[in-house]
Image: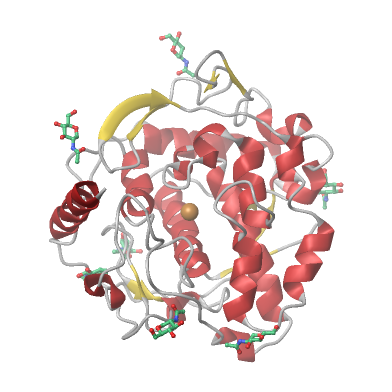
Amino acid sequence: MMASSVRHAVFYLAAISVVFAAPGKRNASICTGIRDRVPWYNLTREEKTSYIQADLCLMNSPSKGVNPLAVTRWDDLQWPHVVQTATVHGVGAFLPFHRYLLTAHERLIKDECGYTGRMPFWNELHDIEDIAASDLWKDEYFGGDGTGPDGCVETGPFRNLTLIWTADGNVTEHCLSRQFSTADLQMTNQANINECNAIQNYTDAWLCWFGGPHGSVGPHAAGHAGVGGVMSDATLSPGDPVFYLHHAWLDKLWWEWQKLDLPNRYTDMGGPNLPIAGSVLGGQGPEFTNYFGDNGNVTTLNHRLYMAELYPNITVGDVMDLNGDVVCSEYINV
Ligand SMILES: *[C@@H]1O[C@H](CO)[C@@H](O)[C@H](O)[C@H]1NC(C)=O
Ligand SMILES: *[C@@H]1O[C@H](CO)[C@@H](O)[C@H](O)[C@H]1NC(C)=O
Ligand SMILES: *[C@@H]1O[C@H](CO)[C@@H](O)[C@H](O)[C@H]1NC(C)=O
Ligand SMILES: *[C@@H]1O[C@H](CO)[C@@H](O)[C@H](O)[C@H]1NC(C)=O
Ligand SMILES: *[C@@H]1O[C@H](CO)[C@@H](O)[C@H](O)[C@H]1NC(C)=O
Ligand SMILES: *[C@@H]1O[C@H](CO)[C@@H](O)[C@H](O)[C@H]1NC(C)=O
Ligand SMILES: *[C@@H]1O[C@H](CO)[C@@H](O)[C@H](O)[C@H]1NC(C)=O
Ligand SMILES: [Cu+2]
C-alpha cells in the first residue's frame, strides 16, 4: 500500500516535470461574437458529419503534445484529463476545468481540422426514455453500443479508434468501448436538475452536478454511466468523442444556474482543492495543497487551469463568464 502510493507519487512528479517543461504563452483573445452551442439534434446534417470528420481528423493527426508517449492529436487532447484526473474531479475546479477542456477541443477542431459549424451539446433529457434510440449513435455519427467480450464499438466512424492511455498515465492500446444503460442515464432528470438549481452557493451546488464518481445520483455520473465503457472511466473518458457533448450538457447546467443570480455567480467559487484520496495520479500531501495557486485547501478564482500546454494556463476566474473572452459562447435551447 505504502510502496505503491509512493511509487505513484514519484511517477506523478516525474510526469509533471516533463509536461510542465515547455513555457506557455498567453494569447490575448477577445470575444467579438458569441458562438451558439446547440443540441446535437439541431445541428444541420452537414454540421453533424463535419463535426465527426473533425474529431476523426484529430485522431488521424500526429501528436504535437508534451507527452512523448502520445501518438495522435486525440491522445494530446485526452492527456490533460488523464494526468490531472485527481486534481480535476471531486474538487471545486471540476466544472471550470471541464469548461476549459471543452474550449480546448473546440479550438483544436476549428484551428487544426477546419470545423466551421456550431458546437453541440447532448440534451440528455431528450434521450432518457431510451439511450440506444438517440440520433447520436447512427452509423454516420458516433456509432453504437459496444459489442463482443471487450464491449468494443464496431459500428460507425470510430470503430477503428485506437486509444492508448491507461489510468496510471502509461500506454496500452485498446478499443473505444461502450455499454449503454438507460437506467443510469435517468440519473439525469428534471427533478434532480431542479434540486441542483435550488442550491444557493457553488460550494454546495457543484457536488449536486458532480454526484458520486460512478453509479451514484447526479447529472455528471448519469451521462458517463449511461454510455458506459470508456465513458465510465473517470480518467480515460475523453477518449470517447461523445464525452464533449456530455460535458457541454453539464457545463450548460452550471451556466444556467449561474445565470439565475448574476453578477454574483460570476465570482461564486469554492469546494475542496485537494486531490481525491486514493487516486492513482496525484496525492494529498502538503506538496499538492497549493499546487494550483489557491493558497489553501479551498478552490478560488485564482486556481490555475492547466491544459498540458495545448493552450495557455488560465485561471478559474477566466472561465466564470461563459460569454467572456475564453469561452465566448452561449447555450441555445431550440
Ligand atoms: C501551468 O500550470 C501548472 C499547474 O499549476 C504549473 O505547474 C505550470 O508551471 C504552469 N505553466 C506555466 C507556463 O505557467
Ligand atoms: C431541435 O431538435 C428537436 C429534437 O429533434 C426538435 O424537436 C426541434 O424542433 C428542433 N428545433 C429546431 C429549431 O429545429
Ligand atoms: C476499419 O478497419 C477495417 C479493417 O482494417 C477497414 O476495412 C475499415 O475501412 C476501417 N474503417 C474505418 C472507418 O476506418
Ligand atoms: C509503463 O509501461 C512500461 C512498459 O510496459 C513499463 O516498463 C513501466 O514500468 C510502466 N510504468 C508505470 C509507471 O507503470
Ligand atoms: C451554502 O449553502 C448551504 C445551504 O444551502 C449552507 O449550509 C452552507 O453553509 C453554505 N456555504 C457557504 C460557503 O456559504
Ligand atoms: C481545509 O482545512 C481546514 C483546516 O484543516 C479544514 O477545517 C477544512 O475543512 C478544509 N476545507 C476543505 C474544503 O477541505
Ligand atoms: C493564438 O492565436 C493564434 C491566432 O488566432 C492561434 O493561431 C494560436 O494557436 C493561438 N495560440 C494559443 C497558445 O492559443
Ligand atoms: Cu472529467
State the residue at coordinates (56%, 71%): 33
Q: How far across and how far down the image is residue 210, in percent?
A: 59, 61
Q: Is residue 168 above or below residue 301?
A: above
Q: How many marks?
A: 0
Rendering coords of residue 66 (x, y %): 20, 50
- Name of the residue lying farthest toward the front: 1
> For this rendering, which residue is in front, 144 or 24?
144
For the question of whether residue 200 can be seen, the reply is yes
The residue at the point 38 percent across, 46 percent down is: 78
Quadrant of the rendering where the C terminus is positioned: bottom right
Q: Horizontal and vertical percent for residue 96?
A: 49, 69
For residue 20, side relative to residue 166 (left or right): left
Q: Position of residue 80 (x, y in %)?
A: 34, 54
In the image, taking residue 134 as reference, residue 119 lies left or right, namely: left
| Side (left or right) of 48 relative to 291 | right
Query: Between residues 188 and 54, which one lies in front from this camera angle?
Result: 188
Q: Please identify the quarter of the rendering in which residue 138 is found.
A: top right
Colour mapping used in the image? secondary structure
Picture quadrant of residue 263 = bottom right
Decide: is 20 above or below 4. Answer: below
